[in-house]
Image (cartoon, rainbow, N blue to C red):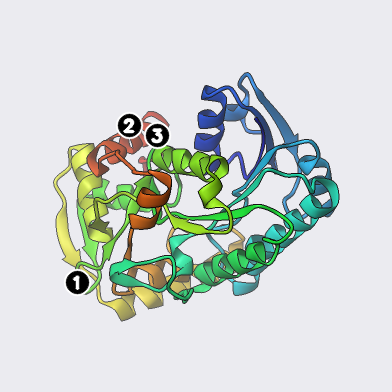
Amino acid sequence: MRALVTGAGGFLGQALVRALTVRGDRVWALVRRPEPALERPGVEVQVGDATDPAALAAAVRGVDVIFHLAGIRRAAERDAFWRVNVGATRLLLDACVAENPGLRRFVLAGSRAASAPSATGCREEEPLSPAEWYGESKAEAERVAFLYRDRLPVTVARPPRIMGPGDKENLLFFKLARAGWALGFGGPRPLSWIDVDDCAQGLLLLADRPEAVGEAFFLASDERSSVQGLMVAAGEALGVPTRRVDIPGPLLSTAAALADLVTRVTGKPLPLNRKLARQVLVPGWVCDTAKARERLGFTAPTPLADSMARAARWYLERGWLQGP
């Protein structure tokens, strides 16, 4: 199979490229800048922006399957999420219609954040009802993708928080745990999660199985946690005892607004932002895994402790946990 992966240099993108090459597929990796981790047999790196129509037109030609992972998770303004997460999706789908109408599968990496918060378990058939800007943009990207279902074989993955080595989104949790803190926000606020390599395997299933066409699937572990639980698990992986501390919601929201102000002034995204604050202050981010299990035979077997241990080793080896 010849696969195009947009956002191939990112956390999930690198895991997906590894999974594709391990099984012998040829990969075209679309990235904004060269990434040494992608320099491996079977991978052809194409430098280009996912919001550039010319780059997308060239990238989609001749491939069998497209995994659209390119997007942004951090931004201080709502428009930035929409410009990239929605705009690039529409441009890529238009490029497929024009340049590769015989495409075998278009797999969109959506997000659990596109659906409504839930402490018990959201299902795929429930209306999309995001709680913050990032989720809004992923919900709209999913709606856009399914507008093309009469012309392209589209499917959508909705992973929750993705864990494992190499991610910057979860680094803050490990830094707090390293300092001995496990922060809570007014209750357990349960969440679903998935290991990055398990998520990559789920994406392969969406590309291969005919049952996936025209459908969205939550890809998640059956093991649940919470933001505070992630920090406790990070502390255990680092061998550091953590102290559980509850942070008032208004205080977190104020700090996040100030962090976004600093981001706008300096142009450097900070780990804390309003998107993260809104995500952790909802009742929960649990999703039901039944549909992916029953229709695709998908399960995410990696235990949280194993995923966190691998991530901790990765961060430590690269010195990412040094300093404040």
Kindly identify the residue that appears in the image at 54 percent across and 72 percent down: 136
Give 32 or 122, whichever is nearer the viewer: 122
Image vertical order of residue 145 relative to residue 239, above or below: below
Of tags 1 and 3, the one toward the viewer is 1
Q: Tell me the element at label 1.
A: loop
Marks 1 and 3, how far apart in space? 32 Å
Question: At label 1, which amino acid type do we have?
Answer: Gly
In the foreground, 231 or 222: 222
**In this rendering, position of residue 187 left or right of residue 320:** left
Secondary element at image label 3: loop
Mark 2 or 3: the one toward you: 2
Q: Amino acid type of disc 3?
A: Gly
Label 3 near label 2: C-beta < 8 Å?
no
Would residue 232 appear left or right of 101 to someone viewing this image?
A: left
Residue 6 higher or lower than 259, as above or below: above
Among numbered discs 2 and 3, the one appearing first in the sequence:
2
Report how many numbered discs are placed on residues in the image.
Answer: 3
Q: Is residue 21 left or right of residue 126?
A: right
Tell me the quarter of the image containing the N terminus: top right
Q: CA distance from mark 2 to mark 3?
A: 10 Å
Q: Is residue 78 above or below residue 98?
A: below
Residue 23's disc number: none
Q: Residue at x 34, y 73 (%)?
A: 252
Instruction: Where is residue 62? Give x, y as percent.
Output: 79, 36
Q: Is residue 299 above or below residue 147?
A: above
* Residue on which disc 3 sits: 319
Query: x and y percent of residue 32 in the render?
Result: 70, 44
For disc 2, the marked residue is 313
Which amino acid lies under the numbered mark 2 shown in the image of this protein? Arg
- Left or right placement of residue 50 versus residue 272 in this view: right
> What percent of the width, then of the height, locates residue 60?
77, 43
At horizontal 49% and vertical 41% (from top left) the residue drawn is 205
